[in-house]
Image (spheres, rainbow, N blue to C red):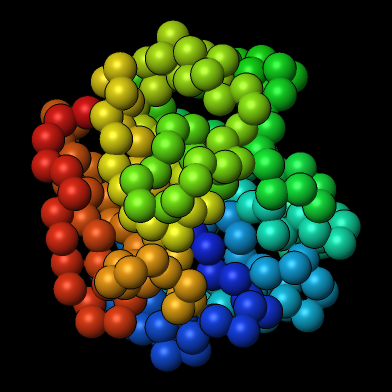
Amino acid sequence: MIIAHLSDLHFGMPEYVEELGNNVLKKIKEIKPELIIITGDITNCGYLEDYEKAKKFIDSLESERKLIVPGNHDVRNAGYLLFEEFFKTRYPVMKIGNLKIVGVDSSEPDLDDGHIGRSTYNFVRKELEEFPLKMVILHHHLVPVPGTGRERNIPMDAADFLKLLSELKVNLVLWGHKHVPWFWKLNGILMINAGTATTRRTKARIEASFNVIKIEERRKILIKRISSRTFKEEIIYNGVL
């Protein structure tokens, strides 16, 4: 199974780069992922015009399946209502073979801070308890990301949520938000942070990028980072779930 992980498209942001967006469309067509995951901030301010552009772009990404959760920028200006209008739910769930994926809305309207909430814990537990392979996707980072300055916006209940994920033996957690790609392995959980895929709002010499995850038989997994500008590939992790 091949999964493309994109984040922080930011349609409506002055720093959005059309060339990068076109490159992503081209590369996704070449990769042919069975699933595309987008971990939030598809828009910059949650405006209707931005959602319309984002929806057109996402519809153009070639894949049979797509899972999308909102980010803090998407829920500005009552954008959470538009997110549900365009993408049906802020808590998507999908099963592919023996893999179950659960999406969580970690955003708070008109705030950059994240929060998951106890009612969501029950939802996640119910959806994931019985599955051999488990993935959770959200927008906000659950652990600090290096090179992003003063730490801000980790969900206020991140520690409790991490405890739940550990108890459930979740295999993968995907997020975005910080525009800096990174990878952690904590208590056996692979945690993958995506950079911004389509904007110039990056740090130092870090390029706009997205991730590709390949899961094979016997739980083999290969995670690569692909530059949205040069298509240069970097292996992040090559191991077993």
In this image, 58 relative to 235: left or right?
Answer: right
Q: Identify which residue is drawn at 80% across, 59% down.
A: 76
Specify the quadrant that holds the C terminus. top left
Residue 3 location (% of width, % of height): 34, 53
In the depicted view, which residue is nearer to us: 159 or 26? 159
Instruction: Tell which residue pokes out farthest to the bottom in this image.
Output: 19
Can you see residue 223? yes
Which residue does the image show at 62% across and 84% down from the upper left?
14
Q: Nearer the viewer, residue 139 or 29?
A: 139
Picture quadrant where residue 48 is located: bottom right
Q: Please tell me whether residue 161 is drawn above or below residue 146 in the rendered image.
A: above
Describe residue 189's horizontal placement relative to residue 201 as left or right. left
Where 240 sits versus 223, above or below?
A: above
Q: Is residue 48 left or right of residue 170?
A: right
Number of numbered markers = 0
Q: Which residue corresponds to the image point at 52% horizontal and 19% vertical from the top-left?
A: 159
Question: Is residue 84 visible from the viewing direction of this image?
Answer: no
Residue drawn at the location 45% of the way across and 78% of the way down:
200
Quadrant of residue 40 within the rendered picture: bottom right
Residue at the top extreme of this rendering: 167
Examine the rendered structure and indicate whether residue 134 appears above or below residue 109.
Answer: above
Q: Nearer the viewer, residue 220 or 233?
A: 233
Percent position (x, y) of residue 138?
Answer: 55, 41
Image x and y of residue 215, in percent: 23, 42
The x and y percentages for residue 136 are 48, 34
